[in-house]
Amino acid sequence: MTIFKSTPSIPYMVNVNGSPQEIWHSRSVAVVGVIIAELDGEKYVLIGQRGAGSPDCRGDWNVPCGYLDWDETGPEAFLREIFEETGVDLRDIPKSKIDGVSEIPTSTIHMTRPFYVNTNPKEPSQNVSLSYGMSFYCYSLPKLTTENSEPNEVADVRWVKIKDLGLFKFAFNHDIRIKMFLNL
């Protein structure tokens, strides 16, 4: 008989809309989004600063990320988290028209499956993380806003030149995720 070293997830019975439902306390799935925009030959990455409402790493920078919600696929969570934390709706990027004539040429899209999956239980929160990415060319960087994010979750959001990444302190090794995506 094979013995596994895992700790089993724990089931709980909860009341959902008047009916009992079993849920499981288990490892969470985080979705990480690396977005690269190229403007006039310069590459920019979309990053946010963790605000006072963040549970950890306040003041550090990260690429947009969050947890997979119920009834949601990884790619759907990727699109939602980018929109919530930055105001950028990636569904519009490949369809955007330049001067009403041509579509923006998209160089790399990793929205249907992750470019990196981390299941390492040695991570502090033991999250499973799915890293998705997208890169595109543009004639102006998409406008940013934090108005859709959780209260005080995101203190600031910016397009930053790749060459300037070393100026920022990143949470969760997101600077490494950015480099991984750039090397694809």
Image (cartoon, grey):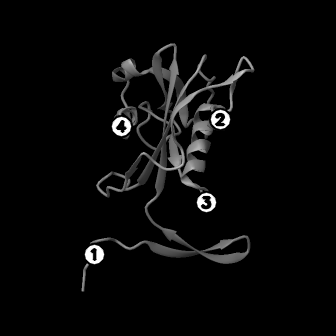
Q: Position of residue 134 (x, y in %)?
A: 51, 36
Disc nearest the viewer among 3 and 4: 4
Please report whichever mark, 2 or 1, sits nearer to the chain's N-terminal start.
Answer: 1
Foreground residue among 161 and 66: 161
* Residue labelled with disc 3: 70
Q: Quadrant of residue 7?
A: bottom left
The answer for how far apart the CA atoms under marks 3 and 4 are is: 28 Å
Q: Are marks 2 and 3 in contact (CB under 8 Å)?
A: no
Q: What amino acid is found at the position of numbered circle 1 in the picture?
A: Phe
Dots 4, 1 in contact, CB < 8 A: no
Q: Secondary structure at mark 1?
A: loop
Q: Provide the residue designation for mark 1.
A: 4
Q: How many marks?
A: 4
Badge 1, how many Cα within 10 Å: few under 14, some, many 20+? few
| Res 89 label | 2
State the image quarter where residue 106 is shown: top right
Point out residue 24 in the picture as x, y percentages from the top left corner. Answer: 51, 70
**Disc 2 versus disc 3: nearer the observer:** 2
State the SS at label 2: loop
Report, in whole angstroms, how far the alpha carbon at label 4 lies from the one at label 1: 32 Å
Q: In the image, is 170 to the left or to the right of 83?
A: left
Query: Spatial distance from mark 2 to mark 4, Cα to Cα?
Result: 23 Å
Going by the picture, which residue comes out furthest to the front?
102
Query: Of the residues shown, which amino acid type is indicated by label 2?
Result: Asp
State the mark number for residue 32: none
Label 4 belongs to which residue? 180
What residue is rendered at 61% in x and 40% in y? 150
Instruction: Tell which residue pokes out farthest to the top in this image.
Output: 40
Compared with residue 184, is residue 158 higher up or lower down, i.e. above or below? above
For disc 2, the neighbor class at 10 Å (few under 14, some 14 to 19, many from 20) is some
Q: Amino acid at mark 4?
A: Met
Residue 61 lies, in percent from the top left, at 43, 31
